[in-house]
Amino acid sequence: MATAKPLEDEVVLDKNVLQRHKKPVCLIVLGMAGSGKTTFVQQLTSRLHARKQPPYVINLDPACREVPYPVNIDIRDTVNYKEVMKQYSLGPNGGIVTSLNLFATKFDQVIKLVEKRSTNTDIAIFDTPGQIEVFTWSASGTIITETLAALFPTVVVYVIDTVRSVSPVTFMSNMLYACSILYKLRLPFIVVMNKIDVVRHDYAMEWMTDFDAFELALSSDSSYNANLSRSLSLTLDEFYKDLTAVGFSAVTGEGFDEFLAAVDAAVVEYETDYCPEHERLQKLNAEAHLKEKSRQRNRFDADFQEEKGSLGISTRRHLSHTSEILLRNRAEDDKIAHKSFRNFMEEQKKKQQSKSNSASS
Ligand SMILES: Nc1nc2c(ncn2[C@@H]2O[C@H](COP(=O)(O)OP(=O)(O)O)[C@@H](O)[C@H]2O)c(=O)[nH]1
Ligand SMILES: [Mg+2]
């Protein structure tokens, strides 16, 4: 099996670019179950260790049996997935989501730990649960991703299984998923075509750049799925144009340097595109918040003025009402007061009488 030999210049370039960032680059590794996320993290970790650039590795999969790489933070140390399932009577996916939710409540501590390592770590890698939707469409997944993206250069690494994607229809559904995540997160995105030691990724690269080639692959299929994939391929053209895809083997490590170069480019994209956009959105949010505040203040002032203007009528109505109630109450109070005064006087009388009776006897 071929292993790509790093060119000396490339190594120096990668190191320089990575070292330029004071904050570690966060790589969020996503992909369908079995696409090779964990093996990819393992390969990346061992290669970075060999380069004396040890990454900070975080496992976010509470259901995995073992973690085959040196892990710095493991969700399983914080949350017991099986206990969560038992305690809340949940199935496997519900258990993972709830475990992730519980972990997300402590994510500020993870951030602090990653921040602490800023001086001697260039890359922080996040391995995610097997089932992709558990992370991408859960509240905790979004919180984790957005928190990281707000604080560190963050890149989404989408792992695709090239062996399982040779069917154009499967390939299309995988790319649609990638597209939906890209537009949901709007973060720099790298597609890792994994398992190229088994099936090369050239077919996928060709399908992404040449519509005719994709159509040809579908020519023998006239099913609804195939027709849909054909139309979608044209629609995804824009998405393909800006997409960075690299071939990789998580087993042999082939494609490692190309991947690192893609990370560098993604970090530049984060700084030039994501950060200004994030700041713009934050500014818009702040402006909208201020606008809403002043709108509410104006409304309050207007209501107050209106109330003041109509004070004569409304207050009179209000006053007549109030005074009526007060009067009635006062009458009631008076009645009670009179009654208790009478009682008091009678009691006093009785006391005096009993005193004089006892004195005369
Ligand atoms: N041949 C080959 N097998 C791989 C590669 N990457 C992962 N695998 C295998 O694919 C299976 C699933 O990998 P895993 O990393 O657990 O996938 P995950 O569910 O996405 O984390 C395992 O049996 C791996 O050994 C690769 O690049 N080449
Ligand atoms: Mg895994």
Image: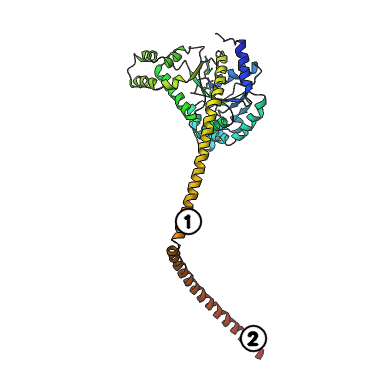
Q: Where is residue 30 in the image (x, y as percent from the top left)?
A: 51, 24
Residue at x 45%, y 27% (from the top left corner):
180
Using the image as rendered, state which of residue 352 and residue 342 is in the foreground: 342
Local crowd size for mark 1, using a 10 Å CA cut-off: few (<14), some (14–19), many (≥20):
few
Q: Does the residue labelled 2 lie within 8 Å of ligand 2?
A: no
Quarter of the image where one finds residue 60:
top right
Residue at x 60%, y 13% (from the top left corner):
10
Does the image show residue 95?
Answer: no
Locate the N terminus and report the quarter of the image it occupies. top right
Question: Which residue is at the far top?
Answer: 1
Residue annotated with mark 1? 304
Disc 1 marks a residue whose amino acid type is Phe
- Above or below, 357 relative to 8: below
Residue at x 48%, y 72% (from the top left corner):
327
Q: Position of residue 18 (x, y in %)?
A: 61, 21
Using the image as rendered, state which of residue 203 and residue 355 is in the foreground: 203
**SS at badge 1:** helix
The disc, 2 or 1, on the residue closer to the chain's N-terminal end is 1
Q: Position of residue 36 (x, y in %)?
A: 52, 20
How far apart are the alpha carbons under marks 2 and 1?
66 Å
Question: Which residue is at the far bottom?
Answer: 360
Residue annotated with mark 2? 355
Quarter of the image where one finds residue 275:
top right
Question: Which residue is at the far left?
Answer: 222
Disc 2 marks a residue whose amino acid type is Lys
